[in-house]
């Protein structure tokens, strides 16, 4: 004779709603997911303009990072643009083939690459800039200048506080060893 499954075993509560399987906050209230959803909402505004200029998000991040400095080593660029090394290598090859960046060997260490944006890359950025700034203006109008500034400040504070937490955790781990 088959036994009837209880609500506890079937994965749903007596009310028919799914039961929680683990004692955690709702997935929808997960900070990483909230940040990813917000990032996606923002990037949805920028992607069409980037596509119109033949750029991916990652290529644009690299060009933006390179435009902010004279030169930068590839490993530092990967950290700055939040890209993994293998992805960065592929993207750099494409940008170099399109003559949007320049690469040379570091004089101090011939195994390292030093990168800079080319004149052609700067020209492309100048072409993209008006649409990028128009999108920022639209976001600002919709969300509010004060709220946007506060959000950026809060995100900076969150990043710094979590970086401090990592440093504290690392120093505590070293003390234990």
Image (cartoon, grey):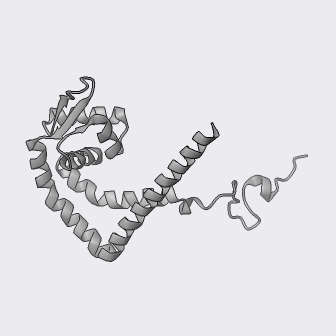
Residue extending furthest right?
A: 1
Between 109 and 123, the residue placed more toward the observer is 109
Residue 164, percent across and down? 49, 54
Q: Quadrant of the C terminus?
A: top right
Left or right, 122 with respect to 76, comes to left
In the rendered image, the vertical position of residue 54 relative to residue 6, given as above or below: above
Residue at the image point whose x is 37% and y is 37% from the top = 84
Residue 6, percent across and down? 82, 56
Residue at the image point whose x is 20% and y is 50% from the top = 68
Between 14 and 89, the residue placed more toward the observer is 89
Residue at the image point whose x is 27% and y is 28% from the top = 112
Residue 69, percent across and down? 20, 47
Which corner quadrant of the image does residue 94 belong to? top left
Left or right, 37 with respect to 90, comes to right
Between 113 and 64, the residue placed more toward the observer is 113
Left or right, 42 with respect to 20, comes to left
Residue 176, percent across and down? 64, 40
Residue at the image point whose x is 24% and y is 30% from the top = 113
Residue extending furthest top?
A: 110
Counting every numbered tag in the picture gives 0
Left or right, 171 with respect to 148, comes to right
In the rendered image, the vertical position of residue 100 relative to residue 143, given as above or below: above
């Amino acid at each position: 004779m088959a036994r009837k499954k209880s609500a506890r075993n079937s994965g749903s509560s007596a009310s028919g709603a799914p039961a929680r399987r683990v004692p955690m906050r709702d997935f929808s209230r997960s900070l990483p997911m909230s940040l990813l959803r917000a990032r996606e909402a923002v990037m949805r505004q920028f992607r069409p303009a980037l596509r119109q200029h033949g750029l991916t998000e990652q290529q644009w991040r690299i060009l933006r990072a390179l435009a902010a400095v004279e030169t930068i080593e590839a490993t530092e660029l990967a950290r700055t643009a939040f890209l993994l090394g293998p992805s960065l290598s592929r993207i750099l090859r494409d940008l170099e083939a399109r003559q949007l960046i320049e690469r040379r060997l570091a004089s101090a260490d011939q195994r390292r690459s030093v990168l800079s944006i080319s004149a052609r890359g700067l020209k492309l950025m100048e072409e993209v800039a008006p649409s990028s700034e128009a999108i920022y203006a639209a976001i600002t109008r919709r969300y509010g200048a004060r709220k946007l500034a506060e959000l950026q400040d809060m995100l900076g504070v969150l990043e710094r506080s979590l970086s401090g937490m990592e440093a504290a955790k690392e120093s505590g781990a070293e003390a234990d060893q």
